[in-house]
Image (cartoon, rainbow, N blue to C red):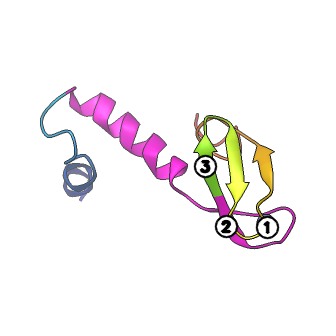
Amino acid sequence: MIKKNIKKLCSKFGAKYGSSLRIRYMKIEKICKKTYKCIFCNKLAIIKVSTGLWKCKKCHQQMTGGAYGFHAFEIQ
Ligand SMILES: [Zn+2]
């Protein structure tokens, strides 16, 4: 089960860079692409703009957060 998921999600790199690095990248990418609940309008619309910068798609509010996830404690 685990092997299947890893193979599917890390197919972007093929056999390159080693399995442990690909798994680590996969975990970070998953958190980066997640949408978060907005503090101002309460909708699931916060997306990542750049490192540490997050923006709401609905109310266009920009806010700071973690580098990878909106909450800095997500990756440990
Ligand atoms: Zn909003």
Q: Residue furthest left?
A: 15
Residue type at tag 2? Ala
Q: Nearer the viewer, mark 1 or mark 3?
A: 1
Ligand 1 shows up in the quarter that is: bottom right
Label 1 sits on a secondary structure element that is: loop
Which image quarter holds the N terminus? Answer: bottom left
Residue type at tag 3? Lys
Q: Is mark 2 within 8 Å of ligand 1?
A: yes
Q: Residue furthest right?
A: 40
Q: Are marks 2 and 1 in contact (CB under 8 Å)?
A: yes
**Local crowd at mark 3 within 10 Å, few (<14), some, or many (≥20)?**
many
Tell me: 55 left or right of 76.
right
Residue topped by disc 3: 48
- Nearer the observer, 73 or 11: 11
Instruction: Kindly report the distance in space between the C-alpha atoms of the residues bearing marks 1 and 3.
Output: 15 Å
The answer to whether residue 27 is magenta is: yes
* Numbered tag placed on residue 45 in the rendering: 2
Label 2 sits on a secondary structure element that is: strand
Q: Residue 64 at what x, y percent from top left?
A: 77, 41
Q: Is mark 1 within 8 Å of ligand 1?
A: yes
Q: State which region is magenta.
A: 17-46
- Nearer the observer, 34 or 75: 34
Q: Nearer the viewer, mark 2 or mark 1?
A: 1
* Above or below, 28 relative to 33: above
Residue type at tag 1? Cys
Tell me: 42 left or right of 8.
right
Q: Which sits earlier in the primary sequence, circle 1 or circle 3?
A: 3
Label 3 sits on a secondary structure element that is: strand
